[in-house]
Amino acid sequence: MGKEEAKKRVTEKGGIVREHVSTDLWYLVTNNKKDESKDSIKARKLGVTFITENEFLEMLK
């Protein structure tokens, strides 16, 4: 599933898509939970839950 389709599915389920890591972000979809990018480090510090694409797809069901 592409990014735009994922955004559409989230909003259809009543979710809100964030473009940047912030204090009101609950989940970050990634297939590398040990990623050391700037956004991943910030998300960890904020206590964001990291989920895989498969976990994300299960949540959309």
Image: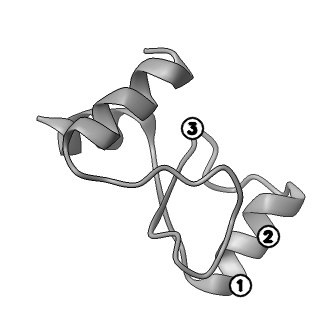
Q: Residue at x 66, y 73 (%)?
A: 22
Q: Residue at x 40, y 55 (%)?
A: 16
In the figure, 49 relative to 59: above or below?
below
Which circle's residue, 2 or 3, is located before the other in the chain?
Answer: 3
Q: How is the image coloured?
A: one colour
Residue highlighted by disc 1: 45
Between marks 1 and 3 in the image, the one whose residue lies nearer the viewer = 1
Which percent across, then down, holds residue 55?
Answer: 31, 43
Q: Which mark is residue 31?
A: 3
Which percent across, then down, holds residue 3?
Answer: 54, 24
Determine crowd level at label 1: few under 14, some 14-19, many 20+ residues with C-alpha closer than 10 A.
few
Describe the element under mark 1 as helix, strand or loop: helix
Which circle's residue, 1 or 3, is located before the other in the chain?
Answer: 3
Residue reaching furthest to the top: 1
Q: Residue at x 54, y 73 (%)?
A: 48
In the figure, 19 relative to 46: above or below?
above
Q: Tell me the amino acid under the disc marked 2.
A: Ile
Where's the C terminus, which quadrant? top left
Which percent across, then down, holds residue 52?
Answer: 45, 42
In the figure, 21 relative to 11: above or below?
below
C-alpha distance separating marks 1 and 3: 19 Å
Q: Tell me the amino acid under the disc marked 1.
A: Lys
Label 1 with label 2: CB-CB less than 8 Å: yes
Q: Nearer the viewer, residue 23 or 52?
A: 23
Q: Which mark is residue 9?
A: none
Describe the element under mark 2 as helix, strand or loop: helix
Q: Residue at x 79, y 70 (%)?
A: 41
Q: Is 37 positioned to the left or the right of 10 in the image?
A: right
Label 1 with label 3: CB-CB less than 8 Å: no
Residue highlighted by disc 2: 41
Describe the element under mark 3 as helix, strand or loop: loop
